[in-house]
Amino acid sequence: MAKHTEFGKLGEQLAVDFLLNKGYGICARNYRYLKGEIDIVAQKGNTLVVVEVKSRNMGFLEDISEVVSSKKIQLLAMAANQYVQQEDLDVEVRFDIVKVVKKGNGFEIEHLEDAFYYF
C-alpha cells in the first residue's frame, strides 16, 4: 500500500476515534454509491453527518474553501441521498470536514461542522 494511502487510512481512523469521543455513532465507513464515496457516515441525535476526512502533513495546509471541490460536494450529496433512502431514514443531513494534520510525532484534529451546504 502506498504511503499516502496508509496515511489517509490512519487519518480516517483518527477521525473516527475523535468523533466517537465526541458522542457520535459511526454508521458506515467508505460508503460508496456510483462515483461518490463518503469517508464516514456518523449520527448524533437526529442528524446524519456526512464526514469528509482530509489528512495533511504540517507543511501542506490549504485554505478550507479549496479542500473540497464542487464536483466532490455533488458526489457526496448524491451518495448521502442514496444512503438516507437505502436506510429509510428521517433525519437532517449535515456535511462536515475533519482535518487531520500531522505535527511531528502527533496529530492535530480540526472538526468543521456545516463545512458546506448542498441544495
Image: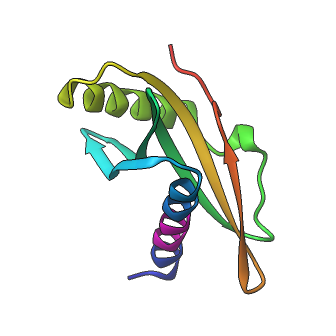
Residue 39 visible to an observer of this rendering: no
Colour convention of the picture:
rainbow
Does residue 110 show up magenta in the picture? no
Along the line of sight, which residue is nearer the eye, 99 or 93?
93
Residues drawn in magenta = 8-14
Residue occupying the point 48% across, 67% down: 13
Question: Residue 69 occupies which quadrant of the picture?
Answer: top right
Residue occupying the point 77% across, 52% down: 62
- Give x and y (percent) for residue 49: 48, 36
Question: Residue 95 occupies which quadrant of the picture?
Answer: top right
Give the answer, above or below, for where 107 lies relative to 25.
below
Residue occupying the point 52% across, 64% down: 17
Question: Residue 18 occupies which quadrant of the picture?
Answer: bottom right
What is the count of numbered marks? 0
Residue occupying the point 21% across, 24% down: 88
Does residue 13 show up magenta in the picture? yes
- Give x and y (percent) for residue 35: 30, 41
Classified by dominant secondary structure, the portion drawn in magenta counts as helix
Q: Residue furthest bottom?
A: 105
Q: Horizontal placement of 61 versus 90: left or right?
A: right
Residue 20 visible to an observer of this rendering: yes
Q: Residue furthest top?
A: 119
- Give x and y (percent) for residue 41: 40, 44
- Give x and y (percent) for residue 64: 73, 43
Q: Quadrant of the N terminus?
A: bottom left
Q: Horizontal placement of 29 versus 97: left or right?
A: left
Give the answer, above or below, for where 15 lies relative to 115.
below
Give the answer, above or below, for where 61 lies relative to 87.
below
